Each structure stands twice: as structure tokens, then as C-alpha cells.
Image: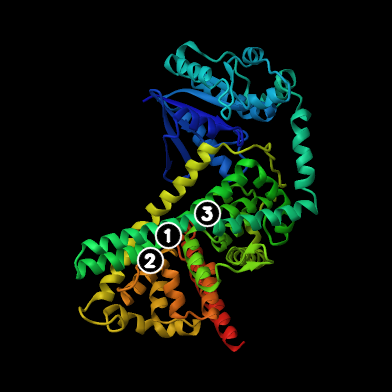
Amino acid sequence: MQRILMVGKPNCGKSLLFNQLTGLRQKVANYPGITVEITRGKCDKFELVDLPGAYSLNGLTRDEVIAVEEIRRSVAEPDTAMVLVVLDATRLAQSLVMGLQVQSLAFKHNKPVMFALNFIDEVKRVGEVIDTEGLSKALGSPVLPLSARSLDGLHEFKQGLLDMAGEPERYATEGATAHEEAAERSQELAKEFGIQHDIVLKNQNRIDNFMLNNWTGGVMFIVVMFVLFQSIFTLATPLMDSVEGFIESLAAGTSAITSEGVVHDFINDAIFGGFGSFLVFVPQIMVLTLIIGLLEDSGYLARAALMCHRPLSFFGLSGRSFIPYLSGHACAIPAIMAARTIESPHKRLITMLTIPLMSCSARLPVYALLVAVLVPADKTFLGVFNMQGAAFFGLYFFGIFMALVVSQILNRFLPRDLEKTDMPFILELPTYRLPHWKPLFQRVINSGIMFIKRAGPIIFMVSVGIWVLGYFPLNSTLQDSWLGQIGHFIEPVFTPMGLDWRYGVAILMSFLAREVFVGALGTLFGLEGADEDVAGLAERVQADGLATEAGLGLMLFYVVALQCVATVAMLKGESGSSKLSWGLYVAYGLLAYTIAVAVNQIGGLL
């Protein structure tokens, strides 16, 4: 199948255009050795390939260098029919630097180039017009205006794209700009054909005067972060209640049609008690993805990174560390990859090593369970905010606080021979835009599905394993089962944390993946009370009498502990050191245990 390559600078609307052309039928693959995200989808009879964004073919950061290597390799392949360069009509000069360099590269390999002039709706909104025919003649390649957001001109663009891909020999590039002249030529073309930049910046600057102000910007940042973590609990609660109600109904229906015995107990305790307890918390992962997606699509994330640069610099970090930190609240693995954009090797390493302290979505089920146990649902903070949501904010804030403390320590003791040159902090501030809801909701739904696919099999196997160990020998109590014997053997390790053997077993099972804790505990409590409702794990734990200080210590344990083998593997791949990654795994585990023991002991004394 012939391919169409999509290239462009970041924030040019390339991904949205890709989704519009493929109908969201994309697949993502990590190529061996480089771990660069390449998105593929079918557009008519062609394969559309969305390559990583870069500002020029002269890559500065590690991420850009890898992206440029992939672009160069893909353009040279014989299966490539043509190259599609996406331009930002509101920032023509910046877009054309990359565009002209790619055009020159494609010209060397005899591949035609088409330019997609995106965001044409924003140009019309400010009363401007771009002479696309004149720009096309100047470039020597077709330039088609469109808006991937409003779909303005999309049909005509798609038809032109397919015509060129079908007969690429008819569209030879005429006189491509030399690579070294691209920057100067882009300024000339933007001056002749582009819009007045100050018109677009006028409204943006008005908002930025408030958002980036030393006082109002700081307050706004705190409000945004607080709303983010409040929303994880408050917005997800109705969805969680619905999922829990569905599981309870399904469990009751299944119990009614199965006779008493091993199969009946397995379905109740292992399937609904263990795996079902985990499914209840999936809506929170989806809400977290939604809020982060809103911040990203609106353009606020870049502003937050700019505001955080100075305070983060005190801890040996960069303003660019903010985005990996925030995305680490969804998953540490892509967050560690996102740290590649940090120019300084020293700051990049510190960021990667502290990202695991960000409370990822895998911790959400654990937090939700323990917060529901320890904090009454009807309690409010300052009479306005839900106290459970405030507790969530406190847990996330503690993770961020610990990350900054550890960053300061690493900044002092990590060798400085990593640092050759400390490049200045440069960040493009994208235009404020409303999110495009269709791909955003698609991303939200996919986050829930992918979380279940990734964690579900592990939790299912652990639930079944715990059920087998806890159920046999037959006719024995949970205390006398094989699992009880193992639990009582390891119980002395967890007694200083104020936890009994059941929690010890659940913690032990979760060292491969944190979210296993909820499923494991659900199975254990299901085995202990098989005659009760199989859902409502929080009520069971609450009725069991978990001490407040032990519960708080357990929550802080999960904030700090690095219980994710996939994250360790990613750290090993990015740092190139097994010793460093596994050493971090052990260090965070010991630190988490020390904090949990201290909280329980001090809380008990008070």
C-alpha cells in the first residue's frame, strides 16, 4: 500500500487533520530502538502516516533528533507516494521553516509535496485573506487552505490530496528552496503572503496578561490544579455509582442462577469481588484524561510550563519538566518519553527519576478506595468543596512535594558531567483554542479501554490466584488457608504500618502493578464474607475497622512506592542503566515504607 507522509511543526493541527482524514481509525506503534510514536490510518486506498512534529530538520532536543531521523528515513522509502506538510496559517513563518526543509528533502528523493494551510477559519475570523495561489507559485507546490476544526475546505483538500497521491509523477516540485536558506526564505514568504501577526496576538495577549501575571496567574494556576483534582473525584462519582450498581445487579443475577459450590464461590469472590472491585474505578481514569486533554487542547499547558520555569529551576528542573510531570498523573511511561524535550541532560535525568512520584492513574483505584473508607462522603471543606475531593488534592500535592524534595537532593548529588551546555528555556505559546470534542472524547474512551486491557489481565490472574490460595484446603477458614499461612508469615513486616496480613498480601501482590491492590483486597474480603454483597468494597473495609493513621500511612505508601515494572523498564531504556532504574525501585519502596510506619506510629501516639 502506498503511503502519504504527514509532517509539520508542533501545534499546527496535524493530529486533528489526521483524525478527520482517517475517521479516527488509527493505530499507534512504537518502533524498536527509538520509541517514537508513529500514527497510521487508512485514507481511501492510501496509508496516512502521521510523523512526529519538529520545528526544523536541525533537531536540538533528543526528541527532535529522533523525530527528524524518522522523517528522513520515511521520505526516502520507495513506498512513500508523497509528502503532506501541514502549515499553521496564523504562524506562517514558523511553519514554513520546517515545510521548506522537508520540501527540499522530498525534492532530492523525487517525491511531490502538498502544503495544507490549516486554521484558515481563524484567518477569516480576524478579517484577513491569504493569497494561496500566489503562495503556491512561490513555493512550487500546491497550497490548499482548510480548517480541520470547522471542516472548512476539507472536502476539496482531501480530493486534491488523493489526486496527487494517485498520480505523483504529475506533481513534481519546482525549484525547492535550499536547506540552509529555509529560515530566511520563510520570513520573506510570510511577509509577502502571511497575515499581520499582531492581529492574531491581540486577543491572545489580552488573556495572557491575566493568565501569566505574577499574581493573578499564580492564583489561576492553583485554582486550575485544585479543580483538576477535585474533578477526579466529584465528576466521576455518579459514573462510579452506576458501574458499581451494574456490577451488583450482575452479581446478584449470576448468584441466583448458580448453585452453591466451588463455581458459585469463584464467580462471587474472584470475578465480582476481585475484578469487579477494580472496574468500579475506571471512570476516574477517564475523567483525569478528559481534564488533562482540556488543558492541553486549550493551550493552557504551555502557559503553566512557562509560569513554573522559575520555581522549578530552584529544584534543578526546567519549565519543560511541568508537562511530563502533569502527564505523569495519567501514566508515567509516556511522561518519561515526554521528558526528551528537556534540552539539559542533567535536568532531563532528574525529571525522569522523579516522574514516578506523580500519582498516575494506576493509583487512582487505591486512593478512591481508601479516601472513601476514611473520609465521609457528605463532609465538605470550607462548606463548599467536597472533603473527599480535597483529600485527593492533598494526596496529589504530597506526590508533587516529594518529587520536588527528591529533585533538590538529586540536583546536589548527581554528577554534573552530564551537562555540556545549558540551553535557554524557549517555549512556543500556542493560540488559545476550544478543544475539538470528537477526538477528545475518543481519547477519553480509549484511556478507559486501554487501562482495562493493560491492568485487567494482571488483576484477573492475581484475583484467581488469591482465590485459589484462600479457598483451599476445602472447608478451611481464610485464616487456615494456604493464603492465610503465607499472610501470617509476612505479617510482621506490615504490623508497624498498623496493617494485618490481608493488607500485607494485597500490597505484596501489587508490587508488579499498583492497581492490583484493590482487586486483591476485594478477593480477600469476598472470601471472608461470601454471604454478603460482593460489591461495595469500601463499606466492607470501613466495617472492618481500618485505623485512620494506618489508612493514611497506606495512602502515602502508595503515593511514594514505585510499584510498576513497566515504568522501571522505561527508565532503564531512557537512562541506559539497569542499576539506576532498579535502585530507584528499591529506594522508593523503602522510603514509602518508612513514611507509612512513621505516620502510623506518630498517629497512634497522638
Q: Which mark is residue 280?
A: 1
Residue displayed at 43% across by 27% down: 77
Q: What is the spatial separation of the Cα atoms under label 2 and label 1, in whole angstroms? A: 9 Å
Q: Which mark is residue 330?
A: 3
Q: What is the spatial separation of the Cα atoms under label 3 and label 2, in whole angstroms? A: 26 Å
Q: State which quarter of the image contains the C terminus.
A: bottom right
| Residue 459 in sight from this viewpoint | no
First in sequence: mark 1 vs mark 3: 1
Q: Is 242 placed above or below 128 here?
A: below
User: Where in the figure is residue 190, as x and y percent of width and height?
Assistant: 71, 22
Tag 3: amino acid: Ala
Helix, strand, or loop for circle 3? loop
Residue displayed at 70% across by 46% down: 303
Q: What is the spatial separation of the Cα atoms under label 1 and label 3, in whole angstroms? A: 17 Å
Q: State which quarter of the image contains the N terminus.
A: top left
Q: Nearer the viewer, residue 68 or 2?
A: 2
Residues at discs 2 and 1 in contact (Cβ within 8 Å) = yes
The reply, left or right, for residue 41 in relation to residue 556 is: left
Tag 1: amino acid: Val
Tag 2: amino acid: Ala
First in sequence: mark 3 vs mark 2: 3
Q: Which residue is mark 2?
A: 535
User: Where in the figure is residue 302, as x and y percent of width and height?
Assistant: 67, 45
First in sequence: mark 2 vs mark 1: 1
Residue displayed at 23% across by 76% down: 472
Badge 3 density bin: few <14, some 14–19, many ≥20, Cα 10 Å = many
The reply, left or right, for residue 69 in relation to residue 90 is: left
Q: Nearer the viewer, residue 295 or 454?
A: 295
User: Where in the figure is residue 376, as x and y percent of width and height?
Assistant: 55, 71
